[in-house]
Image (cartoon, coloured by chain):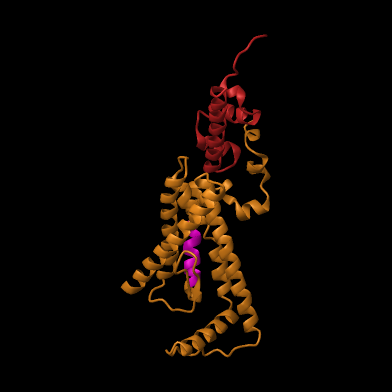
Amino acid sequence: MEGSFQLPPLARISRRDQEFVVAFVKASGSLKEMASLLGVSYPTVRGRLDEIIENLTRGEEEVHHG
Amino acid sequence: MADRALNSRDCGTQVRPSEWLFTPFRYVAGGTSLALGLGAIVVAGLLGALSKTHFDGVLDVHTGRPSPTIWLYPAEGLIDWAALAVVLFVVGKVVSRTAFRAVDLFGTQAMARWPMVIVTLATLAPPYQRYSDYVGYKLSRLEGWMRSPSSDALVSSDVIVFGLVVLVMILAAVWMVALMYRSYAVCCNLRGGRAIGSFIAGLILAEAISKLAIAKVWNIL
């Protein structure tokens, strides 16, 4: 495939972040379920989600600023 | 795949002992931590009643002063916990950009006080009690009021045990503050200077509030 195009936001984040997003969607977006699935506390999962939100936002800003 | 989504240090299956000592809140929070923490505060208070150990401030441990009621001992611990948890909740809401749950902060702050159980167990040692009574008697003479001297004769090794228990108290207090900070940092998702600065400010404010509140309770009784 050739041409100039932008990657979708989820493709711009790391593989580890993508895996978290997929697991999060599969858990119906429940942080509680994610916490129990991963064997960690709710605030730990919340912190990881915040980190991904930050990475997504940074990726979007980089695209907008060229 | 979900396991890989977090750092390996975050996975519940690979918990190192040091993590349970200093960062247990990575794994335990919410209602579980609240139940465990409140249990630890009450147990520390009731054991404290046996050795006349008071937690008369968020960071304070004092021994030797008798209390008019046994319930004052656990009540002091509960006041300390509530003062710091409420202050850090408000500070966290101002400083943190994340939406955090009150039950996590209140629960983990309660659990952070569990090293005080070790302190009260250590202060139960008879040599510590004897030497503590002796020091209290000497201090009362210096301050111009007379406290009755202990009826138990001092043993030469008492001072060594007294020193060891004081060391345990200091180490447990440092450990408790480290846990309080970790609780705040994990629950409010804060890091670096922002986390440390706001935590220290909150701790100083909570110390003042708890001292005032406990003094009021003493005056009422």
Q: Nearer the viewer, residue B170 or A60?
A: A60
Residue at 43%, 90% in the rendered image: B144
Q: Check residue B44 for magenta coloring.
A: yes
Horizontal side of residue B54 vs B167, given as left or right? left
From the top left corner, tell me how far across and down residue B140 is, in percent. 46, 87
* Residue sitting at the far front: A66
Residue at 53%, 32% in the rendered image: A53
Decide: is A4 above or below B50: above
* Residue sitting at the far top: A2
Q: Answer with the quarter of the image where residue A7 lies.
A: top right
From the top left corner, tell me how far across and down residue B47 is, in percent. 50, 70
- The quadrant of the image that shows the N terminus of chain B is top right
Decide whether the magenta segment is chiefly helix, strand or loop: helix
From the top left corner, tell me how far across and down residue A24 is, in percent. 55, 30
Q: Check residue A22 for magenta coloring.
A: no
Horizontal side of residue B48 vs A6, given as left or right? left
Chain shown orange: that is B
Residue at 45%, 88% in the rendered image: B147
Which residues lie in the magenta part?
B38-48
How many numbered marks, from 0 up? Answer: 0
Horizontal side of residue A10 vs B87, given as left or right? right
Decide: is B182 above or below B136: above
- The quadrant of the image that shows the C terminus of chain B is bottom left
Q: Nearer the viewer, residue B49 or B199?
A: B199
Chain shown red: that is A
Q: Nearer the viewer, residue A45 or B99?
A: B99
From the top left corner, tell me how far across and down residue B101 is, in percent. 45, 44
Q: Look at the image and tell me whether residue B36 can be seen.
A: no
